[in-house]
Amino acid sequence: MRLEHHDFRPADLVGGDPALDLVNTVTARDTQPRDWLDDYSALLRWAQRSGAFAREDLSALEILAADAPAKAAAALTRCKTLREALCDALYALAHRREPAEADLESLDQARLAASRAARLVSRDSRLQTLWTAERSGLDLIAHLVTAYAIEMLRDARLDRLRVCDGRDCGWVFIDTSKSGRRRWCDMATCGNVAKARRFQQKQRD
Ligand SMILES: [Zn+2]
């Protein structure tokens, strides 16, 4: 998969869940995939843009990564292993197939690792699972995405899980439309391109 530098924009966050948005850091999975996480700082920029992670955690990770670039690279590799297993499982589920055993095993390993780093805390008389940069280290984003993913995969909205119909896309998203017939990750991009292509086709026919 080709690495590509990318400046993340709000339009890159159309999945409806941070776990889906992480999968969508690879674009054009249907043709020639390009991986926008070209280094650990790209993962941090994505995380910041997503708004799903605490700013102070990301600052702590930035310092950790600067101090240990080789460890940051290894953590990025682990995050991508999670991303790809998640992607395979989501594609299977979106096409009403059972996820492959190997992908479930990968997700289970990620779940175990996240669970080992987690801490149970009491907040306002309620127990919460908490992940910190102190305990998760450079894997904090992967641990949090794992938690999001497990919650999402248990969720009943999986019948609304879709893979975009657009060419050079392959993004996954949760269809929250009333009709449940959304075909594109973003009407303004993939939807319009598909419409334009159909229009050109008609002109030619
Ligand atoms: Zn799309």
Image (cartoon, helix red, strand yellow):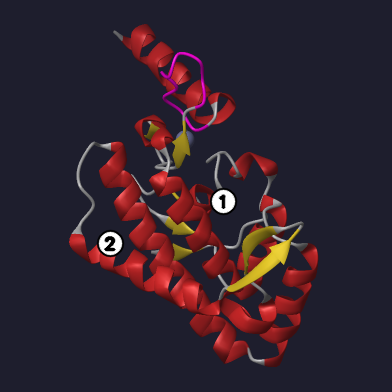
Label 1 beta carbon less than 8 Å to ligand 1:
no
Vertical side of 97 occupied by 131: above or below: below
Magenta span: helix, strand or loop, mainly? loop
Can residue 25 be seen at all in this image of the molecule?
Answer: no
| Percent of width and height locating residue 186 | 54, 30
Q: Which residues are magenta?
A: 176-185
Location of the C terminus by quadrant is top left
For mark 2, what is the residue? Answer: 104
Asked if residue 90 lies left or right of residue 71, the reply is left
| Percent of width and height locating residue 195 | 45, 17
Kind of residue indicated by mark 2: Leu
For the point 57% across and 38% down, which residue is it?
Answer: 14
For mark 1, what is the residue? Answer: 18
Depth check: give the residue in front, 113 or 100. 113
Label 2 beta carbon less than 8 Å to ligand 1:
no
Location of the N terminus by quadrant is bottom left
Vertical side of 119 occupied by 85: above or below: above
Can residue 199 be seen at all in this image of the molecule?
Answer: yes
Kind of residue indicated by mark 1: Pro
Depth check: give the residue in front, 56 or 202. 56
Q: How would you rate the neighbour count of disc 2 (Cα within 10 Å): few for under 14, some for 14-19, many for 20 or more?
A: some
Q: How would you rate the neighbour count of disc 1 (Cα within 10 Å): few for under 14, some for 14-19, many for 20 or more?
A: many
Q: Helix, strand, or loop for circle 1?
A: helix
| Percent of width and height locating residue 162 | 38, 34
Vertical side of 147 occupied by 114: above or below: below
Asked if residue 17 lies left or right of residue 89, the reply is right
